[in-house]
């Protein structure tokens, strides 16, 4: 569900750690309701890109704009900006000393100063949607990995972000749990949420994406629809990357020692 | 007065005497540390057994040592043992005994912790390549335990060195005592000697302990993963 | 005077009683085990081993201290050296603490204590004293601004003393109202007085007199407090042979005015004019008041 | 064993024990405060201050308390600062304890993974809020074992205060040995006194630690 | 490459932890050169099965036989048996205090008492095959996850085991590393190694297996060829299990809020 309202603009972004360039001349526009999946080999800078968007890293050149307003390298007002950008990380990043519902409410109440009753009601509604209402007073350690990631998504959602960033949030999960988390994301996508997703689940990427961005060696190499990208990658690097996920059957009856 | 004070340090053999005192300090703490490490390893292995009796005994021993000030232990052994059993101990022997008892408890607890912190899959992968129980201990568990332990054991040495400052109170002539002798010998002529002598002893302790604790910190960092 | 009389009596009683009890078997045991058990060595064993072990102070100048060359010096050590020489043995000095002098003898860590050991009733129950070789009275030094001229003025005030000294015992028994601030070391006690941590300081009068001379603003307001106490060598209870030998030695040393010489060598340089040798030195174990 | 003697001098021990506990309590209270401030300074890396804190911590951790006390008690008056035995004892304990507590808090702070800070930031909390609501509560919990070990260590260290004429338990015991030669009785009472003071402290901390270790957050029933 | 020589026989195996039955009446025969893949939902007892085979767990009923000889619950001679059964775990289980080559040689030299020079030569040859000869003197912490798992495989291989057991050895790896490890296993399979593999990589399972065993609720539910299993699962449970790995495309142009 994509319309013409640009939410996020990334212009000529350059990010260096010390002297190594991690991201170089990155240009991305993200429209309201769009789901963008970022793919690329390990270490190509996908996480770094999301972290730059969320202001967790300063950038060296270019700019990032949210609704036309510059948000890159704005240390002072960054916490306001982050309230509009939700982010979920790979490692279960819930706060272990708070219950599930406290985890979710910390942002709305302390950062946004919302009414506690109001926020609690919403939190519970969201928890119900991801099937975790009964865990509201549990602590994170009492939850499975998949449950934790669903709570992390709810925590981000409860801030009413304009964009959601997901960084390989299923990478550390068992297959069944992967599924329950991805289902929540598919649901969000259906409802028209704007999302930037980094993932290694190719089938999932293909199913959810409006647009695929393929990063390699600190640059955007390909940018296309999922169909095009998976069936007909333009560059050899993308082809090579996709190859990793295919296996040739070992013909046991043929091979012999 | 102040310049007079520092002069005391360089009179006659005073400097050498203080260093001699430092040697006594080091001798006692290194000897005790060596004994503690050996006995502590044995104790740690005993504590890791599931036998309830040895558990109870070691637990009481550990708890008693943990909460008794070292100075009290020194008095107990130095005066108490002699009196109770008519055993005649020099202050230095008493100090070594006390430090060894104390150090063994500390070390034992560290060894127990280190043994328990070896992940279970290390035992299992040892088994999986067909090693016997003994071989697993010799080639896999003990070398890894030592890496975890060494920094802590070295740390124990600095703590022993610092604690030797107490043995002056049971009359062992070590660095602090020599310092007091110097102060006393000059008390009528150089009243500010105490400031300088104590500052110098403070400095000597630091000079000795600082490198050792740095070494321990370095090893710990290096072997962390 | 009374202190002396009572102590020497105790000594004599014990020696006459126990003379016969030292048997040959005991000697053999001791010879083997040296000082490893709680029984002191006999005179014979000491001579045999070629070395006598004497407990002295290492930090009480000018009675027993270690000089800047690491040598033991002082009034007590002067006597110790002579005893060793007359016994024909080497001497090994063991530094002792005031509070643990009795323990050193009881547990046979040393053969003799020569550490400014004041003769008292309680101590005589634990060890055997030989004839005295010195006498002292207590003195009290205090700041000129609030000079203490009588011990009773100290009631409710803080008096600084050194642990294990006669002053500590004396005030604990006779002036329980006086608050005592106790230190292990003389210098600590003096420093405490200088720093104003107490109203006065009490110890042997010779000592305070000498100190007051060096330190302006302080005077000795009381220079002879209580009874005159005697100071004597001590041995383990029942070590009669050694005790007898020391007594004989002290008596015979009177012929050459040994302790006056001792005074001149060790105390005079420190105390100078502050003290009179006659108020301090005892020759031949005889107190002449 | 002389029961009469024991009962006669028991009040002295009680008094001394009270003093020991008092000094230890005040000293530990301020140690925690100082340690907390120092660990904060190091955590935030306040420019010059954090170097000073580093030096303080190394000095304090690598020298014995006894010498620190002698220095405070006999050294400082030479430059015009005179502290009473009590203040000296407290100052010494705080000087020593501050660095130990600082290290305990530091290891707590360092053990909190960076992702916790980042996810706090990413829900729009300010840096201050992240510290208060996320880092601090976790760090304090993590430091509890080290903290309790330090408390026991510091209470034990009070035994050296007798060296600066503070009438604590050790001082009384030494007195009785020196004056009356009642070694057995004096030592027995000394050991009992420390057991009475430290055993409950040790047990309470063991319980708290166990609760923290096995239950963590939100599994109190398992304890 | 399967022939009729039975290497491993599992007969009526029952395994309990306390009172819960984890494996119930398991019967499996494994023939020389065969590759068996064990599939099943999380917690169904796959790891436990491998651990029983390797004698890391005692069993309550039934028996396990290697070349006809009973090996279950034989504590005394188990270390001899284990020399014939290689096992690689999910967690990188290299010994952190030994270099790569020392890790590999520990078994051959200490357990089998082989000649050091001989064994070293073989170890180096194997390392070369998995592309890690240059790491021979590195320590495990200097290797990536994928490299560590390849070393773990070499360590097991160097003992000349008759059967190799692999327990989800790629579960904690990044996709590219997964590939490099799986390639090593494919290679082994081609050469006719006998293997029992637990994995969550369905494509890989399909490619490498001679036979699939599907475990659920402590029992063997299906046992068939990969083709049959993936294209035509007999039981509904297996269907449900396979479903987890399929995604329906979210039609962004259709769904709208
Ligand atoms: N704090 C840092 N300092 C220096 N280099 C860093 C830092 N963080 C990341 N890098 C480097 O930046 C590059 C990109 O890292 P990034 O985590 O963005 O990769 P990624 O595409 O997310 O990889 P993956 O798929 O493994 O998560 C890597 O080469 C990494 O080594
Ligand atoms: N030591 C143990 N004590 C008690 N129960 C255990 C123990 N180890 C495993 N279990 C239980 O046995 C069951 C099977 O565990 P197992 O690890 O074999 O499953 P799995 O099929 O390998 O799962 P996964 O795919 O998650 O690795 C689980 O329900 C687990 O909770
Ligand atoms: Mg990443
Ligand atoms: Mg498993």
Image (cartoon, coloured by chain):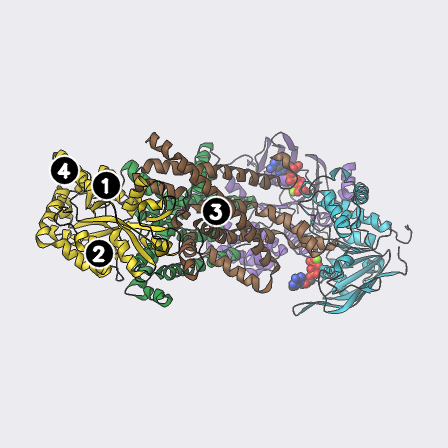
Chain colours: A cyan, B green, C yellow, D brown, E purple
Q: Quadrant of ligand 4?
A: top right
Q: Is residue B132 visible?
A: no
Query: Mark 1 to mark 2: distance in Å?
Result: 24 Å
Q: Which residue is mark 1?
A: C120
Query: Mark 2 to mark 3: distance in Å?
Result: 47 Å
- Disc 3 CB within 8 Å of nearest ligand 1 atom: no
Q: Classify mark 1: residues with Cα within 10 Å, few (<14), some (14-19) or many (20+).
A: some
| Residue C72: percent from left, percent from top | 23, 56
Q: Nearer the observer, disc 1 or disc 2?
A: 2
Both labels 2 and 4 in a single chain: yes
Q: Classify mark 3: residues with Cα within 10 Å, few (<14), some (14-19) or many (20+).
A: many
What label does residue C275 carry, if any? 2
In which quadrant will I find the C terminus of chain B? bottom right
Judging from the image, mark 2 belongs to the subunit labelled C
Residue A239's place in the image compared with E220, above or below, is below
What label does residue C12 carry, if any? 4
Q: Is residue A168 visible?
A: yes
Q: Earlier in the sequence, mark 2 or mark 4?
A: 4
What label does residue D154 carry, if any? 3
| Nearer to the camera, A247 or B169 | B169
User: Mark 4 falls on what kind of element?
Assistant: helix
Both labels 2 and 3 in a single chain: no
User: Mark 3 falls on what kind of element?
Assistant: helix
Are the residues flagged by discs 2 and 3 in contact, CB closer than 8 Å? no
Q: Earlier in the sequence, mark 1 or mark 2?
A: 1
Both labels 1 and 3 in a single chain: no
Q: Nearer the observer, disc 1 or disc 4?
A: 1
What label does residue D120 carry, if any? none
Q: Residue at x 33, y 36 (%)?
A: D184
């Amino acid at each position: 569900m994509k319309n013409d309202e640009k939410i996020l603009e990334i212009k000529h972004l350059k990010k260096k750690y010390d002297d190594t360039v991690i991201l170089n001349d990155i240009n991305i526009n993200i429209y309201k309701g769009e789901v963008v999946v970022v793919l690329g080999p390990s270490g190509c800078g996908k996480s770094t890109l999301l972290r730059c968007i969320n202001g967790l890293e300063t950038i060296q050149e270019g700019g990032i704009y949210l609704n036309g307003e510059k948000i890159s390298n704005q240390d002072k007002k960054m916490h306001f900006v982050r309230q509009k950008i939700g982010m979920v990380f790979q490692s279960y990043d819930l706060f272990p000393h708070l219950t599930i519902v406290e985890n979710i409410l910390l942002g709305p109440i302390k950062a946004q100063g919302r009414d506690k009753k109001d926020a609690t009601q919403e939190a519970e509604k969201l928890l119900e949607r991801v099937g975790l209402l009964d865990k509201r007073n549990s602590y994170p350690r009492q939850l499975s990995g998949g449950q934790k990631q669903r709570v992390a998504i709810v925590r981000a959602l409860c801030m009413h972000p304009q964009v959601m960033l997901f960084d390989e949030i299923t990478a550390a999960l068992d297959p069944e749990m992967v599924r329950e988390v991805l289902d929540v994301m598919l649901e969000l996508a259906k409802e028209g949420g704007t999302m930037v997703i980094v993932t290694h689940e190719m089938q999932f990427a293909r199913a959810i994406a409006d647009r695929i961005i393929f990063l390699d060696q600190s640059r955007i190499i390909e940018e296309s629809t999922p169909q095009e990208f998976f069936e007909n990658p333009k560059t050899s690097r993308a082809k090579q990357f996709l190859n990793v996920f295919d296996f040739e059957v070992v013909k046991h009856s043929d091979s012999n020692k | 007065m102040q310049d007079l004070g520092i002069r005391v340090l360089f009179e006659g053999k005073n400097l050498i005497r203080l260093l001699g005192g430092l040697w006594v300090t080091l001798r006692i703490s290194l000897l005790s540390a060596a004994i503690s490490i050996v006995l502590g390893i044995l104790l740690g292995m005993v504590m890791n057994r599931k036998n309830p009796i040895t558990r109870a005994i070691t637990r009481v021993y550990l708890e008693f040592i943990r909460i008794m000030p070292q100075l009290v232990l020194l008095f107990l052994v130095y005066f108490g043992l002699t009196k109770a059993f008519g055993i005649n101990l020099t202050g230095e022997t008493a100090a070594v005994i006390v430090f060894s008892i104390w150090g063994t408890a500390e070390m034992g607890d560290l060894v127990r912790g280190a043994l328990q912190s070896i992940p279970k899959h290390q035992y299992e992968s040892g088994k999986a390549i067909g090693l016997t129980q003994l071989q697993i201990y010799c080639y896999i568990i003990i070398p890894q335990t030592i890496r975890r332990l060494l920094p802590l054991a070295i740390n124990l040495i600095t703590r022993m060195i610092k604690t030797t400052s107490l043995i002056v109170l049971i009359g062992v002539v070590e660095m602090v005592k020599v310092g007091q002798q110097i102060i006393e010998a000059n008390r009528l002529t150089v009243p500010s000697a105490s400031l300088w002598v104590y500052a110098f002893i403070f400095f000597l302790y630091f000079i000795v302990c600082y490198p050792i604790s740095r070494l321990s910190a370095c090893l710990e960092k290096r072997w962390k993963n | 005077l009374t202190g002396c009389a009572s102590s020497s009596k105790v000594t004599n009683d014990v020696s006459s009683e126990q003379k016969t009890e030292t048997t040959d078997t005991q000697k053999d045991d001791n010879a083997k085990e040296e000082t490893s058990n709680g029984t002191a060595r006999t005179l014979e064993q000491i001579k045999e081993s070629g070395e006598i072990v004497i407990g002295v102070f290492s930090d009480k100048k000018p009675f027993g201290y270690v000089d800047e060359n690491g040598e033991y010096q002082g009034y007590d050590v002067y006597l110790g050296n002579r005893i060793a020489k007359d016994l024909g043995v080497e001497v090994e000095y063991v530094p002792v603490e005031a509070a643990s002098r009795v323990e050193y003898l009881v547990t046979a860590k040393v053969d003799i204590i020569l550490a400014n050991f004041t003769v008292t009733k309680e101590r005589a129950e634990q060890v055997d004293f030989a004839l005295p070789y010195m006498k002292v009275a207590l003195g009290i030094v205090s700041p000129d601004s609030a000079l203490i001229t009588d011990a009773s003025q100290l009631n409710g005030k803080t008096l600084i003393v050194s642990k294990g000294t006669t002053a500590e015992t004396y005030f604990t028994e006779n002036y329980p109202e006086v608050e005592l601030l106790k230190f292990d070391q003389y210098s600590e006690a003096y420093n405490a007085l200088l720093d104003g941590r107490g109203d006065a300081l009490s110890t042997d009068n010779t000592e305070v007199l000498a100190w007051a001379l060096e330190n302006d603003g302080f005077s000795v307001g009381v220079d002879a407090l209580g009874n005159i106490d005697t100071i004597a060598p001590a041995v383990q209870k029942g070590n009669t042979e050694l005790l007898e030998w020391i007594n004989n030695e002290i008596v015979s040393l009177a012929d050459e005015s040994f302790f006056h010489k001792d005074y001149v060598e060790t105390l005079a340089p420190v105390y100078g004019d502050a003290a009179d040798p006659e108020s301090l030195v005892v020759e031949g174990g005889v107190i002449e008041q | 064993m002389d029961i009469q003697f024991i009962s006669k001098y028991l009040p002295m021990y009680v008094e001394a024990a009270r003093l020991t506990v008092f000094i230890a309590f005040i000293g530990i209270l301020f140690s925690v405060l100082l340690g907390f401030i120092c660990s904060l300074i190091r955590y935030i890396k306040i420019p010059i201050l954090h170097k000073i804190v580093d030096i303080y911590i190394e000095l304090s951790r690598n020298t014995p308390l006894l010498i620190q006390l002698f220095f405070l008690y006999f050294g400082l008056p030479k430059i015009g600062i005179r502290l009473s035995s009590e203040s000296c004892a407290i100052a010494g304990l705080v000087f020593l304890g501050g660095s130990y507590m600082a290290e305990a808090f530091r290891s707590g702070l360092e053990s909190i993974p960076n992702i916790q800070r980042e996810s706090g930031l990413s829900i729009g909390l300010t840096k201050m809020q992240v510290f208060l609501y996320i880092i601090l509560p976790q760090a304090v919990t993590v430091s509890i074992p080290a903290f309790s070990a330090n408390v026991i260590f510091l209470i034990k260290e009070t035994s050296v205060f007798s060296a600066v004429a503070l009438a604590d338990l050790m001082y009384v015991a030494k007195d009785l040995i020196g004056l009356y030669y009642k070694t057995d009785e004096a030592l027995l009472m000394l050991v009992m006194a420390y057991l009475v003071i430290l055993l409950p402290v040790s047990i309470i901390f063991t319980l708290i630690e166990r609760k923290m270790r096995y239950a963590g957050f939100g599994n109190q029933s398992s304890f």
